[in-house]
Image (cartoon, grey):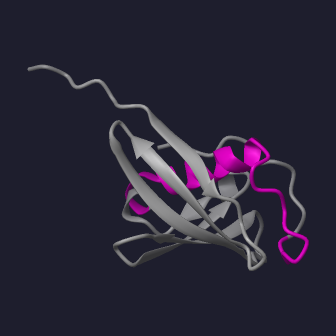
């Protein structure tokens, strides 16, 4: 049996958040790309909250990024494995400084997140 080599997964910011806070990112896995719109939303329980909508499928996920204990997502991957590409991707964009904290965000101020479980 031939073991498949995992394809590298990358995330890119296609459009920075606009005046309403809505942006677009895409996750590429090999030759496949999935596009998502996102908007930061208030998170009163720690970390930073995001509403993430996968384009073309109508799937909406609520994603929380922060310290490892603060990371969560409503996708099936996170619910099963405790990690997912949405958390890992948004964490990476925050660590790269691509998603600064919005002035209108009611999230409590956070240092850039430590590494959350990656997908």
User: Extreme left residue here?
Assistant: 1
Does residue 83 appear in this view? no
The quadrant of the image that shows the N terminus is: top left
Q: Is residue 86 above or below residue 51?
A: above
Between residue 16 and residue 42, name the one nearer to us: 16
Residue drawn 75% across and 41% down? 96
- Left/right placement of residue 58 relative to residue 116 reads left
Residue 99: x, y in percent? 76, 56
Give the residues drawn in magenta, as a range: 79-107
Q: Is residue 100 above or below residue 4?
A: below
Residue 105: x, y in percent? 84, 75
Residue drawn 74% across and 80% down? 20
Q: What is the quadrant of residue 117 in the picture? A: top right
Q: What is the quadrant of residue 8 in the picture? A: top left
Does residue 63 appear in this view? yes
Check if residue 22 falls in the magenta segment: no
User: Extreme top residue here?
Assistant: 2
- Left/right placement of residue 53 relative to residue 63 reads left
Residue 66: x, y in percent? 73, 55
Residue 51: x, y in percent? 59, 74
Residue drawn 13% across and 19% down? 2
Residue drawn 37% across and 64% down? 76
Q: Is residue 113 above or below residue 73?
A: above
Q: How many marks can you see?
A: 0
Between residue 85 and residue 20, name the one nearer to us: 20
Check if residue 82 falls in the magenta segment: yes
């Amino acid at each position: 049996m031939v073991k498949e080599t995992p394809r590298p997964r990358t995330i890119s910011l296609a459009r920075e958040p606009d005046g309403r806070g809505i942006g677009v990112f895409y996750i590429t896995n090999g030759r496949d790309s999935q596009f998502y719109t996102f908007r930061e939303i208030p998170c009163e329980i720690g970390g930073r909250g995001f509403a993430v909508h996968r384009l073309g499928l109508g799937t909406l996920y609520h994603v929380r990024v922060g310290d490892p204990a603060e990371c969560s997502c409503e996708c099936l991957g996170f619910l099963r494995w405790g990690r997912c590409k949405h958390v890992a991707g948004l964490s990476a964009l925050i660590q790269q400084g691509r998603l600064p904290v919005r002035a209108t965000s009611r999230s409590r101020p956070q240092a850039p997140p430590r590494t959350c479980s990656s997908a």
